[in-house]
Amino acid sequence: MNHTPHSNRLHIAIFGRRNSGKSSLVNALTGQDTALVSATPGTTTDPVTKAMEVYPLGSCLFIDTPGFDDDEGELGEMRVERTLKTVEKADVALLLYEEDGTLEKQWMDLLAEQGIPVIPILNKADSRRDVASLVLRIERECGRTPVVVSAKEGIGIQDIFDAILEKLPEDFGEQTITGGLVAEGDVVLLVMPQDIQAPKGRLILPQVQTIRELLDKKCLVMSCTTDKLQASLQALVRPPKLIITDSQVFPVVYRQKPAESSLTSFSVLFAGYKGDIHDFVEGAAAIHCLTAQSRVLIAEACTHAPLAEDIGKVKIPRLLRKRVGGGLQIDFVSGSDFPKDLSRYDLIIHCGACMFNRKYVLNRIAHARAQHIPITNYGVVIASLTGILDKIVIHR
């Protein structure tokens, strides 16, 4: 469990003013000196994360954020902006209230607009004069009873965990990579090219996570490289129920697969696991409307040095320009960089997002939808461009 990727953990973000005790609360919640604590306001300048297991919540990621009241010029604005970016990833928010709750009420409304469950917290109970009257005022202002804690004394910490359990999104943890595509006893063949993009000596995260899920489902799993596909099929007593491959070799695998076997890719599966596969399939239709004057944004979750045959930086642009024309404008962003204004784009193409949590990807989809910009996914795009989108199976 300690090796659970951050992207698969419940993201619990702590918001509040500078010196409201956010870092002390994170340390109390994690039982460790995770965040730097100081009486000087603004000590936390970047979000600080700590992954841990919390019974009965499971795998969690606590995020300590800079104070949302930071008014120290341009640097303060940058800190607040990073706090705002954390909102996009939060599954649950802990909001620390102060006696003047004006800013807190604004943030309560902001978080509610994003559909994020909010737990109001009244910290520093050990040093406040009239806790009871302050609790009543917060109840009147936000309509919710705050959890009263003292991070310094370790009081009320279990109450926070209990509140998180009550506020846990109903569907959290129910999403699976393969959905209903396979069941116990099904034979699944994984075709995984070990080319220049494959890290030497290990498998990439989507492959590892998919294999683990298939084993948990009691499937019979076999894997091979693309050049050994025929030999692998011949070695099987019966055709595989499902073949999962790298999107880049869709055409090669499709030509060789048995008629009885369904085909999909890791990227397509993760489109449904991390985001909304139906939005991505619908967004792929925009490919047919692109012209040489169009502009496309390609977004990757992870940052890495581009390789000779990089799927996002080289292969997909090449396929698009071959279809549309060499004049097609393509921009690239990676990591947490994602434009607020998407109006210049005719299409957004996102990676499989194995490094992002589902909430973050869904926020990006909603952001694009709000501006009426179609958004799709690497695997869906390649399936569309190679003419087999209607012949592969998607997460359901």
Image: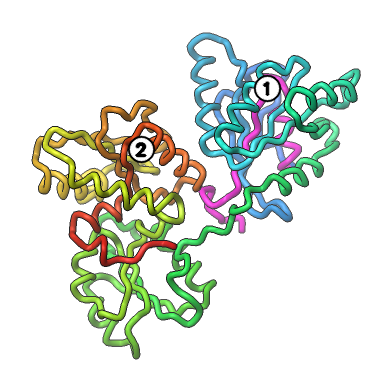
Q: Please state the horizontal and vertical placement of residue 109, each as a whole percent of the image.
A: 62, 27
The three-letter code of the residue at mark 1 reads Glu
Q: What residue lies at 83% left-to-right and 37% top-to-bottom?
A: 154
Q: Which mark is residue 334?
A: 2
Nearer to us: label 1 or label 2: 1
Q: What residue lies at 27% left-to-right and 49% top-to-bottom?
A: 284
Magenta-colored span: 1-30
Taking the image as shown, residue 385 lies to the left or right of residue 168, namely: left
Q: What residue lies at 59% left-to-right and 54% top-to-bottom?
A: 171
Q: What residue lies at 15% left-to-right and 47% top-to-bottom?
A: 318
Residue 194: tell me if it is visible. yes
SS state under label 1: helix
Residue of label 1 = 104
SS state under label 2: strand
Residue 202: tell me if it is visible. no
Q: In front: 285, or 222?
A: 285
The three-letter code of the residue at mark 2 reads Ser
Q: Please state the horizontal and vertical placement of residue 208, each as a whole percent of the image.
A: 44, 63
* Rendered position, 318 above or below 18: below
